Image: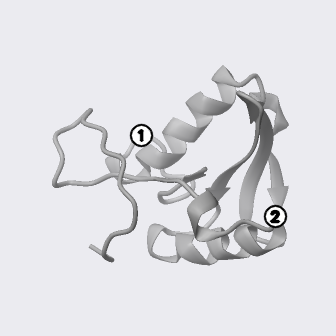
Amino acid sequence: VAGLGNYGMRGTRHSVGMEVLDRLARQLAVAEGWRVDKRCCADVALATAHGLELVLLKPRRFMNLNGLSVASAAEIYSLGPGDIYLVHDDLDKALGKVAIKLGGSAR
């Protein structure tokens, strides 16, 4: 699960993906487990939920370069595209509205 955004710019709508990951880490009791993984230029925490092993990822790059961290992490942790969930803002959606979709455009 990758929380996208601009690292270090907390409280901005564009970094809501990272805020969601922080909350998820607290709910999964791994909030103290964040560590810097220089191989993918991201903060990483490992968790288990409902029998699934999760890699929580917060890229340490600007939003337009988050994909580099996600791609590196996918290779490091042997993840395929179907294993990856991206959490990010979408200005086309009302604040607080959540949508889950498979695939999409660069928009």
User: What residue is at 55 percent from the left and 70 percent from the top?
Assistant: 66
Name which residue type carries label 2.
Tyr
Secondary element at image label 2: loop
Mark 1 crowdedness (10 Å alpha carbons): few <14, some 14-19, many ≥20 = few
Between 98 and 60, the residue placed more toward the observer is 98
Rendering quarter of residue 29: top right
Above or below: residue 39 compared with residue 101: below
Mark 2 vs mark 1: which is more N-terminal?
Answer: 1
x%, y% of residue 73? 73, 67
The mark lying in front, picked from 2 and 1, is: 2
**Which type of secondary structure does the marked residue at label 1 adopt?**
loop
Mark 2 is surrounded, within 10 Å at the Cα level, by few (under 14), some (14 to 19) or many (20 or more) other residues, namely: few
Q: Position of residue 53 (x, y in %)?
A: 78, 42
Q: Which residue is mark 2?
A: 77
| In this view, 24 is above or below 39 | above
Nearer to the camera, 103 or 18: 103
Q: Is residue 104 above or below residue 88?
A: below
Identify which residue is drawn at 49% across, 60% down: 6
| Count of numbered circles on the image | 2
Q: Is residue 80 above or below residue 47?
A: below
**Residue at 60%, 35% in the rendered image:** 22
* Residue 93 on image: x %, y %: 18, 47
Q: Quadrant of the C terminus?
A: bottom left
C-alpha gap between disc 2 and disc 1: 29 Å
- In the picture of the structure, the residue carrying the numbered disc 1 is 11
Residue 38 visible in image: no
Amino acid marked by disc 1: Gly
Residue 12: image location, x then y, percent: 37, 46
Dot 2 and dot 1 residues touching (CB under 8 Å): no
Q: Residue at x 41, y 40 (%)?
A: 11
In the drawing, does residue 21 fall left or right of residue 47? Answer: left
